[in-house]
Image (cartoon, rainbow, N blue to C red):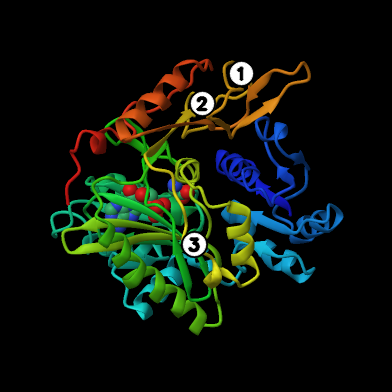
Amino acid sequence: MRVLVIGSGAREHALLLALRRDPEVEGLSVAPGNAGTAGIADQYDVDITSGEAVAKLAQRIAADLVVIGPEVPLVLGVADAVRSVGIPCFGPTKDAARIEGSKSFAKDVMTAAGVRTARSEVVDNPAHLDAALDRFGPPGGDPAWVVKDDGLAAGKGVVVTADRATARAHAASLLDAGHPVLLESFLDGPEVSLFCVVDGETVVPLLPAQDFKRVGDNDTGPNTGGMGAYAPLPWLPDDVVTRIVDDVVKPVAAELVARGSSFSGLLYTGLAITPQGPAVIEFNCRFGDPETQCVLALLETPLGQLLYAAAIGDLADEPPLQWRDGAAVTVVLAAENYPGRPRVGDAITGSEVDGVLHAGTSRSDDGAIMSSGGRVLSVVGTGADLPAAREAAYQLIKSIRLPGSHFRSDIGLAAAEGRIAL
Ligand code: AMP
Ligand code: GLY
């Protein structure tokens, strides 16, 4: 099987590595890829937001399967374009990708499916903002305001704050830019990212993971695209995963089928485990970054065969997934000033070793690996348990040099020390 992966992050690097372990995968291509993926896949520079360009490339290289990593092409209908030329594609239609692309669509589906989520309101008129802010946040019972961009914002469009002026300023700047604002009640509890391979009403969960969204240790500073992750979650009982699948993912998948927007691909559910039970923070229509890097490090089931089965409608016939024992931890190495405008163009050393996945990297004419984005690398450590996996990841990241770069030192720490309790 020849597989074409679309995207250029560490998530796509992880997908390629897992695909390469599948004995049925004999050819790997990526578009556009990065300096790290160049060594394991044929690299093509096409506009991945153009369905026509991606479908043409898939035909030209005779791909048997296209796997779309990021949300932007999915929301724009690139999977539809690939399917329309008769090539199986792992990734939802434009219609189904609205579960991520439009927060109001996602809320509507959740309401219809009876799924617990935050109370919310959309504000599109600045004149209504103050009254709406009064209905959320302190002192009315919510410990914080949650202010979101009602569209795609790579995780960075969200501000969670107990300071009304900060909440108001973020909402006002979104409205100024012409973006409707979503206000939400605050969901309190440890967060879980649960990835499920979904085809219609068939739902196959992967290992639960936890993502670290804030830039600084102890969850300080602004939200980012994700600074690290670990899997599985030693504090999360197996029956809670079963409950999330039965009470959240399956009803949502069924609701999408009922609406004629059947989902096929990876449905990512981000939840908070509140005192009242799991509640949905968001859905994404694709693998999460950086959770994928640690989840796939533990997958023993051949990934190409799994994704192909979902893409051709055979997911229900797949055998149960097999996992390695132990744990995996991902730590993201970010460029100076990320999540603000990142410093780029610096040489990186120590990044061409096993366990280092590339994201914002490119190769200079003289062959050096250069930084070219905000999240530059993802380092993955595995071990018999979470402390061992943390140790492996932090040993590895120490050997990498990138001027001005930073990373969090507490990925998975609270869980490793038994400080997360339900
Ligand atoms: P999102 O882009 O919707 O995933 O939000 C980014 C991060 O903001 C989440 O991972 C949470 O940490 C936080 N967040 C978003 N919505 C809520 C909410 N309703 N209650 C508490 N935290 C939230
Ligand atoms: N890990 C967060 C995301 O992929 O959106």
Closer to us: 174 or 217: 217
The three-letter amino acid code for the residue at tag 1 is Asp
Q: Which residue is mark 1?
A: 346
Disc 2, SS: loop
Percent coordinates x, y for residue 156 in the rendering: 44, 45
Q: Which residue is mark 2?
A: 335
- Cβ atoms under marks 2 and 1 closer than 8 Å: yes
- Measured Cα–Cα span from mark 2 to mark 1: 9 Å
Q: Residue at x 52, y 29 (%)?
A: 355
- Cβ atoms under marks 3 and 1 closer than 8 Å: no
Q: Earlier in the sequence, mark 2 or mark 1?
A: 2
From where the camera sits, is residue 126 visible? Answer: yes
Which residue lies most toward the right here?
A: 60
- Height in image: 32 above or below 396? below
Percent coordinates x, y for residue 342 in the rendering: 53, 29
Disc 1, SS: loop
Q: Which residue is mark 3?
A: 100
The three-letter amino acid code for the residue at tag 2 is Ala
Q: Earlier in the sequence, mark 3 or mark 2?
A: 3
- Measured Cα–Cα span from mark 3 to mark 2: 27 Å
Percent coordinates x, y for residue 304 in the rendering: 63, 54
The three-letter amino acid code for the residue at tag 3 is Glu
Disc 3, SS: helix
